[in-house]
Amino acid sequence: MNKKILTLSGVAMAAVITLAGCSTPGGNTSGTSTSPAETSAAATTPAAADHNATDTMFAQMMIPHHAQAVEMSDMILKKQDIPANVTALATQIKAAQAPEIEKMSGWLKSWNESATASAGAHAGHGMSGMMSADDLKKLDAAQGTEAAKLFLTQMIAHHEGAVMMAKTEESGGQNPEAVELSKTIITAQEKEIQEMKDLLAKL
């Protein structure tokens, strides 16, 4: 009886090896063959499908968030008598975030998602750290050291909001590029937050 069991086990193992040797990489395991048409369709499946609602929300919300940071940086760069290290920071923020806006806009287009969220689409998920119209007016009107201090104070809060949004994407996103960008934003902006706090303490 034991001899029969061993013989059957040997035959079964040989069959598994044979099937494994005949299967194609990435082929299905249902026992049915994949037709050329199915293989072609699988190969051309758009990456657009490789995202979820968290990815969409991240891009739709971070684009206007970044756009405001660029706007604030432009405001400070147009002013006179701003400390060089503050203008250098504003230039750095603009240089980093403007290309990221383009990147995220491209994702939304490839995902066939709206460039902007519909009203109420992200209820309960506000864009943390966004400045109000009055905040921007104050920054626009300020001059010299006062403007530098206001810019740093506002941008610290702005960055803290962006980091919160990026952490939501990092933990819940699906698209690899979007998740990677969220990690980049967290690392870069946490570093800039500390840099801005140090600058603010010296003004």
Image: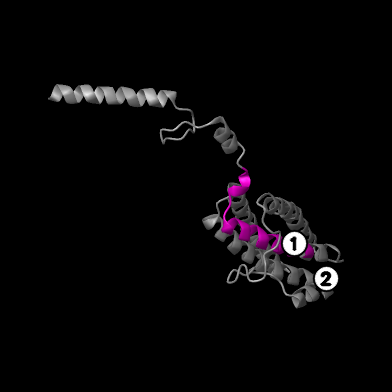
Which of these two is toward me, 87 or 60? 60
Please give the range of residues in magenta. 46-71
Q: Residue 140 in the image: x percent, y percent?
A: 82, 72
Q: Are marks 2 and 1 in contact (CB under 8 Å)?
A: no
Residue 67's label in the rendered image is 1
From what the image shows, is residue 83 above or below residue 101? below
Q: Tell whether 73 sits left or right of 111.
A: right
Residue hosting label 2? 144
- At 28% from the left and 26% from the top, the residue drawn is 12
* Most common secondary structure along the magenta stretch: helix
Q: How crowded is mark 2: few (under 14 residues within 10 Å), some or many (20 or more)?
A: few
For residue 183: magenta?
no
Q: Residue 21 in the image: x percent, y percent?
A: 42, 23
Which of these two is toward me, 31 or 180? 31
**Does dot 1 land on a helix, a strand or a loop?**
helix
Q: What residue type is labelled 1?
A: Ala
